[in-house]
Amino acid sequence: MIRVEGLRKRYGDQEALKGIDLHVERGTVCGLLGPNGAGKTTVVRILTTLLRPGGGRAEVDGLDVVRDAARLRFRIGLAGQHAAVDELLTGRRNVEMFARLYHLSRAQARRRADELLERFGLAEAARRPVKEYSGGMRRRLDLAASLIVSPPVLFMDEPTTGLDPRSRMQLWELLRDLVKEGTTLLLTTQYLDEADQLADQVVVLREGAVAAAGSPEELKRTIGGDRVQIVFRRPGDVDTGLRLLRSTGTPEAESAEGRRVTVPAADGAQSLIRIAGALDAAGIPVEDLTLRRPTLDEVFLRLTA
């Protein structure tokens, strides 16, 4: 659904994009990650026809972002970093205005506004001015406006910035529903848990280039496997416990800080069971025993440090 090959963009002496390749399958979610200035928003602006590329080529739903820009705008939706809604208008008038900009008739615009406001839980607030909306309500209204023409491809640039945890989870559920219905979603985000929750594919940008790409699980495996974290109840048991574990074939501890020890877990849950059994049989009490998997935060820091 999205095909990018050798995409480049320069601002004066600064090369913002250095030949990016990106392929996103239909009906999937691609999370675009990277530190500030990595090129995420530039990619989104090019793919949504707001910015011309300096080199390479990009297609969305089979349409070239430069040659077919006018046609493409009727095939995509965009929700930017800041909700693009008029605070002085009501929620209903905002959606109707966007519908009219898509050349729907007044009657069609009213019907579409009713459908979208109901779907996004804004029907009761439809007659209130947007300046009275919460941040989560504004973001939902912005998303509703981006779906006027039921676009097959939706772009979201940091969609949950500034939202409280409940509003973030509500928006995640709305996005999951859209993807189940066949929408292809490309989102940029600073929240690694957001990409972990939503994305089928994660692309990490660093200084205008792709540092890594793959599913969240594939990227986690690049920095090593699972670990078992042990918190001994008594500080004096740490050395005894580690000697015992080495005698049972457990690898050397990766870290030991106070009563907390971390050891590699080559076979995941089986390592946890084996370690728990050995410590219990030896009568060594533990306060906590946890199987810990790598996180996208660790992947991100490793790739962008």
Image (tube, helix red, strand yellow):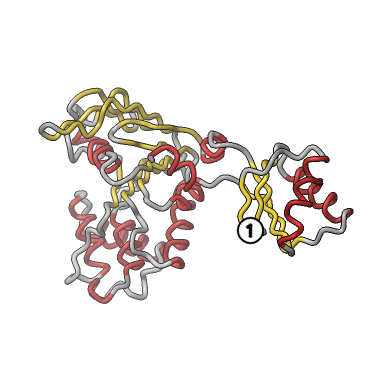
- Looking at the image, is 1 positioned above or below residue 157? above
Q: Quadrant of residue 115?
A: bottom left
Q: Is residue 74 visible?
A: no
Q: Nearer the viewer, residue 35 or 8?
A: 35
* Identity of the residue drawn at 33% across and 45% down: 35
Q: Nearer the viewer, residue 268 or 122?
A: 268
* Identity of the residue drawn at 54% across and 33% down: 222
| Three-letter code, disc 1 | Gly
Q: Position of residue 267 (x, y in %)?
A: 73, 38
Q: Furthest residue to the left? A: 12
* Identity of the residue drawn at 83% across and 40% down: 248
* Identity of the residue drawn at 18% across and 40% down: 50
With 173 as the anchor, is 148 left or right in this view?
left
Q: Nearer the viewer, residue 260 or 192?
A: 260
Q: Quadrant of residue 120?
A: bottom left
Q: Residues within 10 Å of mark 1 (few under 14, many from 20)?
A: few
Q: Position of residue 88 (x, y in %)?
A: 17, 71
Q: Is residue 50 visible?
A: yes
How many numbered callouts? Answer: 1
Quadrant showing the C terminus? top left
Q: Position of residue 108 (x, y in %)?
A: 27, 56
Q: Which residue is mark 1?
A: 258
Q: Furthest residue to the right? A: 281
Mark 1 secondary-structure assignment: loop
With 64 as the anchor, is 200 left or right in this view?
right
Q: Position of residue 240 (x, y in %)?
A: 79, 52
- Looking at the image, is 13 positioned above or below residue 302? above
